[in-house]
Image (spheres, rainbow, N blue to C red):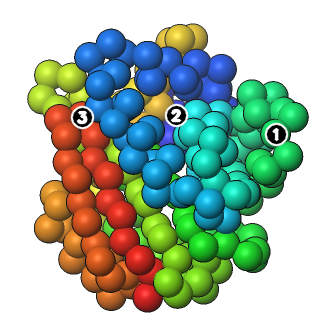
């Protein structure tokens, strides 16, 4: 039986989630992303969206003034808190990505989140960031490129254009997960009304977008 409950999928995957960062062929690009991220959040007050198990939170914390890392999944947050316990500049809060907490931020980081946002909900998400994070703040997003023979194949496309993958967990359960892949031009076009100074850097496995919120 296939499950389409995304929160359940990530709860069951939490203990194994960081395995995606251990693939040998992806290490050079991952290191590049980490280096760029730490430079971009230098001395900033960061709001992190969908922090997962805090892999990227840990890199932000090295140079940011403060990080509020949010995720809607309590199992992910439990692992994240354990990983970064004892770091006073990092706080964690359970929050839906479409109901982010107010705060004194000047940067937002959303790693591997944009691909899971439905096309019809992207504008709402970006408008919220403009309100919560504020005009003039830095936005950093990064996500997967689709790589033939390496990425999980696309199982279906819905009427809106969202694409879905079927993923299998170690217990053998199968889950349908929304996973959209975008060209550079599509990313720029979508962000244009909400941000300026949009830059996209694309590697073989990952892309990174940086911009300044309007």
User: Secondary structure under badge 2?
Assistant: strand
- Label drawn at residue 103: none
- Label drawn at residue 205: 3
Q: Pick the residue in front: 182 or 106.
A: 106
Judging by the rendered image, the residue that carries numbered circle 1 is 87
Judging by the rendered image, the residue that carries numbered circle 2 is 3
What x and y, as percent, mark residue 32?
Answer: 34, 36
Badge nearest the viewer, 2 or 1: 1
**Residue 16 sits above or below residue 154 on the image:** above
For disc 2, the neighbor class at 10 Å (few under 14, some 14 to 19, many from 20) is: some
Q: Cβ–Cβ below 8 Å for labels 3 and 2?
A: no
**Can residue 11 be seen in the rendering of this structure?**
yes
Q: Quadrant of residue 148?
A: top left
Image side of residue 72 versus residue 119, left or right: right
Image side of residue 150 versus residue 98, left or right: left
How far apart are the alpha carbons under marks 3 and 2? 27 Å
Q: Earlier in the sequence, mark 1 or mark 3?
A: 1
């Amino acid at each position: 039986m296939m499950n389409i409950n995304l929160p359940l999928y990530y709860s069951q995957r939490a203990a194994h989630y960081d395995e995606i960062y251990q693939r040998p062929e992806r290490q050079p690009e991952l290191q590049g992303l980490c280096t760029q991220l730490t430079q971009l959040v230098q001395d900033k007050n960061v709001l992190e969206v969908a922090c997962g198990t805090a892999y990227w939170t840990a890199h932000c914390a090295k140079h940011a003034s403060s990080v509020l890392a949010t995720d809607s999944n309590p199992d992910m947050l439990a692992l994240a808190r354990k990983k970064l316990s004892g770091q006073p500049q990092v706080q964690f809060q359970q929050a839906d990505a479409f109901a982010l907490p107010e705060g004194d931020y000047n940067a937002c980081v959303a790693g591997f989140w944009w691909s899971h946002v439905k096309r019809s909900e992207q504008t709402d998400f970006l408008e919220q960031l403009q309100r919560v994070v504020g005009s003039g703040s830095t936005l950093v997003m990064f996500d997967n490129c689709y790589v033939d023979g390496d990425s999980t194949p696309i199982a279906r496309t819905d009427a809106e254009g969202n694409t879905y993958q079927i993923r299998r967990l170690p217990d053998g359960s199968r889950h349908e997960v929304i996973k959209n892949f975008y060209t550079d031009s599509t990313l720029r076009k979508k962000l244009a009304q909400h941000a300026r100074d949009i830059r996209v850097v694309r590697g073989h496995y990952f892309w990174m977008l940086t911009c300044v919120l309007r």
